Image (cartoon, rainbow, N blue to C red):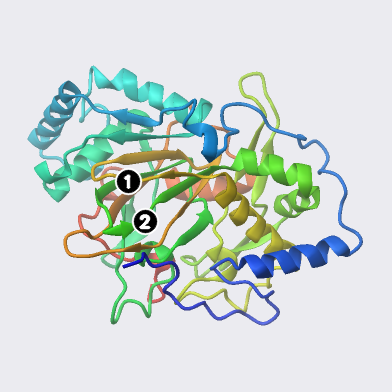
Amino acid sequence: MAAAIFVTPPALAPPGQPDITYAPDYGKYQARRDQRIKSAGLPGGLPRGLPQQLTGKLVWEGDTLGDTYKWTYVLEPSQLEEINLALRHFQSLNLPLGYVKQETFPLPKLHSELRKLSDELHNGHGFFVIRGIRVDNHSREENIIIYAGLSAHIAPKRGRQDSKFDGKPAAVTLSHIKDLSGPGKSEVIGSPAYTTDKQVFHTDSGDIVSLFALETAAEGGASKLASTWRVYNEIARTRPDLIHTLTENWDVENFANLERPYTSRPLMHYLPATESAPERVILQYARRSFVGFGALPRSPNIPPITEAQAEALDTLHFLGEKFCVDTYFQKGDIQYVNNLALFHARDGFTNAGEKQRHLLRLWLRDPENAWETPQPLKARWAQLYDDVTPESEVLPPEPYIRSASNKSR
């Protein structure tokens, strides 16, 4: 059986919206691109101060990346034993899961290796995979402790992914990425994370997005990563007008915030070089925030996107596909991605029998290596990382549809 591509019907478009849906249509993209190029008045150069091209390890193409970079870190038996000792130490403390941190999950030998991997995230190629965790040897709670404990040595701050749990205020820092569709559920799902659909190129929120594979699909589901710096270079070279579009304000829908339904900000941010950091470009966006998905269409109370913005969304996606690398999850893999410099997608997939794709997700930050947060993102980053206390933190053992993806929120 072939893996699913797009199963969920397109969300209803609001009045005045261009002809664009969550599922990118290459023919419509070409027609829109050609029509806009023929029109007069497109800017001919880049916005003032932005680089003609970015350079460094973060500029890569998937077709050739494997020739120079080996991104899988395979745990040795002695390291697995050190992880098991750390697990038993945390369990002996009888503390809630919010207290998992470097001090309560000690890795005296492995710590230095994990710090090197954090440097790779921030100053190298922007991603890596840790391989070898024996998921089946542990309970669900133990796998969560191991995941949070290892991650604490790479990026110790866990970000808030939901602000309520079981109807009560909470700092939910762990999400389950799993197909939850079906009768009574498909009617409320507003994100492909809870379906078998293909996920188009996007970023999550926060500095680092991490995924831990508890189980893989029967077929499909490849994780796709692309360098936004390589994509920037291509757009800057061929269509500098779209850099103008991406660095101007967009109306970004806030699905989980009924009091403030949208925020206006750029999708692309430029950070000039400083004495301690090179110049950087940061991309932060999710396509569904502009076109909707499933049970959460774009609100008619938010201004529709423009034709230029529609073309920019498709340009990002199709260049992501052109330059991406596929990383195929094995059971027990943990993937870490610099969410400021890379964006990601997922192939559609098919589950069967015991092969039910199930990932855990963390949004992380490493204060020691963290990039400067652009001013327009600081309020969102404060929502993610501020005031997350061990007492308020929840790492749910079972999947549920988080508020930002749930029509019934």
Where, by quadrant of the figure, is residue 182 drawn?
bottom left
Kindly identify the amino acid type of the residue bearing the numbered disc 1.
Phe
Q: Which of 165 and 119 is in front in this view?
A: 119
Residue annotated with mark 2: 221
- Discs 1, 2 touching: Cβ within 8 Å: yes
Dot 2 alpha-carbon crowd within 10 angstroms: few under 14, some 14 to 19, many 20 or more: many
- SS at mark 2? loop
Residue in the image at 49% along x and 67% along y: 255
Side (left or right) of 140 relative to 393: left
Looking at this view, name the residue that lies furthest to the right. 40
Looking at this view, name the residue that lies furthest to the front. 1
**Residue 305 percent coordinates (x, y):** 69, 68
Separation of marks 1 and 2 at Cα, in angstroms: 8 Å
Where, by quadrant of the figure, is residue 70 drawn?
top left
Side (left or right) of 366 relative to 37: left
Residue annotated with mark 1: 329
**Residue 306 percent coordinates (x, y):** 73, 68
